[in-house]
Image (tube, helix red, strand yellow):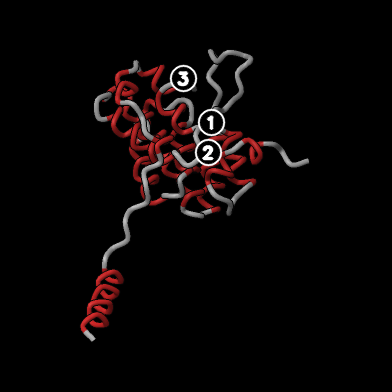
């Protein structure tokens, strides 16, 4: 009888104990030396910084944490770092965390000559599943006047193809809609 009571108590305790967290994904760990990289190496080099980490399947959240750690010490690049952290969080499916970060990446209206803010608006509308707002933001971006000094070979406006992909794949995940498949025109 005592053995049965002890067994029942042990089973009850096991049922009320929180499960152990999943083991850390070793491939998603990053070396703090990556945080000492210059901004271009950290932000743009596919073999270093956050891009190298985010290219590993399942490491989007770890890469977002790396961007956050980097931006804590890189004030001059905050808008772009907010944007990249937001993109990674959106790719990981955490739209609620991504949207406020995207808001922080906005340019002051008087300095937004390349349509960054309509691009931000379009992306946030996509994450909120608001197709009307997404379409309006796309229209504002598409109507942006082309600067006279813009290099002739450069497409205008920037990010219009990305926004078109968000519209084309509306209802899919951000990771899918942002990807190259959705940017290809449907023929």
Q: Which residue was labeled with disc 2?
A: 140
Which residue occupies 44% across, 39% down?
60
Q: Give the SS element for disc 3.
A: loop
Q: Give the SS element for disc 1.
A: loop
Disc number for residue 45:
3
Q: CA distance from mark 3 to mark 1?
A: 30 Å
Q: In the picture provided, is 124 more to the left or to the right than 182?
A: left
Q: Nearer the viewer, residue 154 or 113?
A: 154
Q: Nearer the viewer, residue 65 or 82?
A: 65
Graded by Cα atoms within 10 Å as few (under 14), some (14 to 19) or many (20 or more), the crowding at tag 2 reads some
Q: In the picture provided, is 64 more to the left or to the right than 144?
A: left
| Residue 85 against residue 97 in the figure, above or below | above
Residue that sits furthest to the right in the current view:
187
Residue 74: horizontal and vertical position, in percent?
27, 24
Which residue occupies 23% across, 82% down?
5
Residue 141: horizontal and vertical position, in percent?
53, 35
Disc number for residue 144:
1
Q: CA distance from mark 2 to mark 3?
A: 32 Å
């Amino acid at each position: 009888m005592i053995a049965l009571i002890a067994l029942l108590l042990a089973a009850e305790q096991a049922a009320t104990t929180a499960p152990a967290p999943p083991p850390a994904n070793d491939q998603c760990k990053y070396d703090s030396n990556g945080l000492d990289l210059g901004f271009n190496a950290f932000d743009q080099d596919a073999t270093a910084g956050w891009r190298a980490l985010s290219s590993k399947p399942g490491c989007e959240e770890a890469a977002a944490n790396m961007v956050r750690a980097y931006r804590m010490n890189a004030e001059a690049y905050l808008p772009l770092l907010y944007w990249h952290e937001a993109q990674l969080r959106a790719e990981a499916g955490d739209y609620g965390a991504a949207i406020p970060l995207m808001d922080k990446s906005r340019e002051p209206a008087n300095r937004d000559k390349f349509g960054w803010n309509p691009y931000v608006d379009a992306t946030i509308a996509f994450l909120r599943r608001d197709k009307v707002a997404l379409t309006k933001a796309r229209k504002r971006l598409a109507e942006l006047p082309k600067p006279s000094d813009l290099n002739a070979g450069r497409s205008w406006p920037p990010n219009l193809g990305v926004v078109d992909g968000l519209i084309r794949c509306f209802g899919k995940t951000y990771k899918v809609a942002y990807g190259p498949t959705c940017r290809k025109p449907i023929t």
